[in-house]
Image: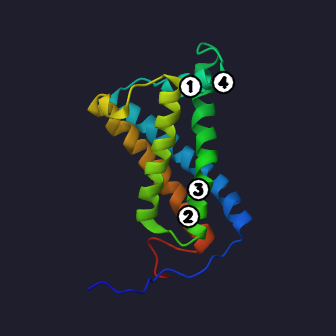
Amino acid sequence: MASNTSSYPQGSNSSFGQAVAVGLGAGAVGVAFMTVANKMEQLITGRPNSYVPGHTTGNLFRISRNQSPDGLNHLHHWGLGLITAPVRAIMAYNGMTGPYASFIFMAFRLTVDEVLENYAGTTPLPWTLPIMDQTIDLLHKFVFAFVSGYVCDRTIQGIRYFGKDY
């Protein structure tokens, strides 16, 4: 039978403002890891770059798709990483930590992407995409969410996932 007490620390090592700042940094680290994972996946699968993120940003801000498509892709990924990761930091600040919290955050991050892409008219509903595209998107967002979550949990709550301090 499961215990009713958590082995995680109670309270936070940070103020709310510090937690939000940690979220910004965690978002940058998460996007960096996601970008590396993306390039590794492309080496393995031979998949070309997707310009859906850049097209989404271009459509939302009324910028031509042809004007720096790689730049628009980076703006999309880095911008959403920096905008969404503070949510994961606030989760950690309030005691929602660990892999389950990161899984919930992954769903949030995917939802933000899909709402923007559908609003911008750049993709159909995600479940209508080819299975391989769905799988790749989920894997990349998994990397982002779990790396960002680890940085938030470690910095805000002092939790080490692979240590003995919890």
Residues under numbered marks 4 and 3 in contact, where contact means CB atoms less than 8 Å apart:
no
**The N terminus appears in which quarter of the rendering?**
bottom left
What residue is drawn where x is 43% and y is 25%?
123
Can residue 86 be seen by looking at this rendering?
A: yes
Amino acid under disc 4 = Phe
What residue is drawn where x is 63% and y is 39%?
79
What residue is drawn where x is 58% and y is 24%?
70
**Residue 141 on image: x %, y %:** 45, 45
Task: Name the residue beneath numbered marker 1.
Answer: 54
Task: Name the residue beneath numbered marker 3.
Answer: 87
Residues under numbered marks 4 and 2 in contact, where contact means CB atoms less than 8 Å apart:
no
**Residue 166 on image: x %, y %:** 48, 81
**Marks 4/2: CA–CA distance:** 30 Å
For marks 4 and 2, the one nearer the N-term is 4
Q: Is 76 left or right of 21, judged from the image as shown?
A: left
Amino acid under disc 1 = Gly
Residues under numbered marks 2 and 3 in contact, where contact means CB atoms less than 8 Å apart:
yes
Task: Name the residue beneath numbered marker 4.
Answer: 61
Q: Is 22 left or right of 132, judged from the image as shown?
A: right
For marks 4 and 3, the one nearer the N-term is 4
**Marks 4/3: CA–CA distance:** 23 Å
Task: Name the residue beneath numbered marker 2.
Answer: 91
**Marks 2/3: CA–CA distance:** 6 Å
Amino acid under disc 3 = Val
Q: Is residue 163 above or below residue 91?
A: below
Q: Is residue 103 above or below residue 159?
A: above
Q: What crowding class fits label 1: few (fewer than 14 Cα within 10 Å), some (14-19), or many (20 or more)? A: many
Q: Which element is circle 4 on?
A: helix
